[in-house]
Amino acid sequence: MSEIISVRRRRLILGLGAGAGSLLLGGCDRLSNLPQTESVLGSAEWLTRAAQRAIVSRDALAPQFTRADIAPVFRANGTTDPANPDYQALARNGFRDWRLRVDGLVERPGSFSLDDIRSMPAQTQITRHDCVEGWSCIGEWTGPRLREVLSRVVPRPQARYVMFFCADPMDDGSDFYYESIDMRTAAHPQTLLAYALNGETLPMAYGAPLRLRLGRQLGYKMAKYVMHIQLVQSYRPFGQGGGGYWEDQGYAWYAGI
Amino acid sequence: MKHSSGFSEGADRKVYIYRHTLAVRVLHWVNFLTLAIMLMSGLQIFNARPDLYWGASSDFSHPILALYAMQDDRGDTKGVTAIGSHTFVTTGFLGWSRGADGQYTERGFPRWATLPSDTWLAMGRLWHFFFAWVLVVNGALYVLLALISGHLRRDLWMRRTDWRRLGHTLLEHLRLRFPKGEEARRYNGLQKLAYLCVIFGIAPLIVLTGLTMSPTIDAGYPWLLWLFDGRQSARTIHFVCAMALLGFFLVHLAMVLLSGVWNNLRSMITGRYAIEVAAPATESEHE
């Protein structure tokens, strides 16, 4: 008798457990689709960012590696061949007509050719690229520090963010990839505008002719095919206001984890 | 664990002891909910790149573990789980399972195991990094309270007798014979070891390997990379720890079910745990 009861009880418990489990699951799925959920869960991102800022100096350097660590095949992610006729025309001509516009909250808006950029003091560093998907690849990047480029246009004190506008069209082609970083990150010694990967001219799949390289953030922050840099007070007026293409899809702006 | 009350029931006397303090009970259920969300949102994140590597970077030709779909000789698509150079067909579960529309699709872990169910990395990360804070705060509170209240020293710390009887306790558990009467007043050695491994082994390891995956943390604390042999190793260890916690949970659940489910559940809800004492009843206390 008590055996039967205990079997029934066990079934009941298991049933209740499974029921509670699927309720929790379904509940979390339904919650995920509510706009409030994103803002509630997203509040922890502010906390994580504040905690990271509190325990890691803004000047701390990302670990550097040796030539032996360089990935034999560096994974190319996101856009690898921009479906943009203007860009493709520039590429066919070896980017000889390509110009990088740098303007916004600066004293002397400028426009730089690839040769101008190549003649600036360059930095070569072997760092790890961490994709938000979870993989990592190590490569050797060469290019001037962003602060070197910015020093030529003289940022105004009101400038708080650096916007990067890119040549790669996203989705149906109505939007282009864009990103933003703050001035502290822009001044970091490992923040480069890279024109070479592993000692060779940057291939198209990796963002030719010029891409952003950051030492301490995830891959999606590192805009490829950079065409236009603009210093601004706020990134809110651009795109959907998230500060970048992936940020507009719900990914964190600070991208530190 | 103090006596609270008892009543007579034939020859055996059922005695209720106060097993779990209110704090332990609340922290236990918060922890349960949090771990479930962490595991499932973690699997969503894992699915974005359903393979694991060792070292600083991903050597794509040598994954330790990879879940993917492939076509066999007949042109049928199979789900494959590769561990090192060994492959297993796991169609319907790992690598190839049904999506929201009921059609088979390539995905690491199946819909029912991930949060959200559909492939949605950004939302998985939001859940994971929110509940990571809940987990850490809840865990830190538990350790702090366990230290201050003496719970750790009194109830969890391994004693010499626990070590001596460990083999015997293991055999008894394998025969599904669980401590009764006076023996059941205390945690046995196996129980203590399992809890201690989780609290002071897997939990800190999963937090540290999680932090090591952050490129910003790596800049400030490069010794973490040295400790875990690189970011991809840290990701692998993080995954193994999650599976170990899942294993702990399954064994824990089995033990709860097998060793008196109502009694165990009651003790974790009201705090009161019944033990049977063989001594004849000399008093009759009632609730």
Image: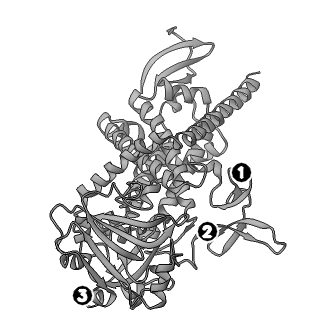
C-alpha distance separating marks 3 and 2: 44 Å
> Subunit of mark 3?
A
Amino acid on which disc 1 is placed: Asp
In the rendered structure, the answer to whether residue A203 lies left or right of residue A7 reads left
> What is the quadrant of residue A105 in the picture?
bottom left
Residue A191 seen anywhere in this rendered image of the structure: no
Q: Quadrant where the N terminus of chain B lies?
A: top left
Tell which of B287 and B88 is nearer to you.
Answer: B88
Residue lying at the far right in this picture: please name it.
B74
C-alpha distance separating marks 2 and 1: 25 Å
Mark 2 and 1 residues: CB-CB less than 8 Å, in contact?
A: no
Amino acid on which disc 3 is placed: Met
Amino acid on which disc 2 is placed: Ala
Tell which of A52 and A176 is nearer to you.
Answer: A176
Q: Is residue B282 above or below residue B276?
A: above
Label 3 crowd (10 A; few <14 / some 14-19 / many >=20): few
Q: Residue at x 59, y 55 (%)?
A: B119
Q: Residue at x 76, y 71 (%)?
A: B71
Label 2 secondary element: strand
Q: Is residue B222 above or below residue B264?
A: below
Q: Which residue is mark 3?
A: A120
Work out whether mark 2 precedes mark 1 in sequence or the reverse, and give the earlier one.
2
Residue B133 seen anywhere in this rendered image of the structure: yes
Residue A13: % across, % down: 65, 30
Q: Which residue is mark 2?
A: B66
Label 3 secondary element: loop
Q: Is residue A74 above or below residue B65?
A: below
Residue B253: % across, % down: 59, 40
Of labels 3 and 2, the one closer to you: 3
Tell which of A108 and B98 is nearer to you.
Answer: A108
Q: Residue at x 37, y 59 (%)?
A: B211
Of labels 1 and 3, the one closer to you: 3
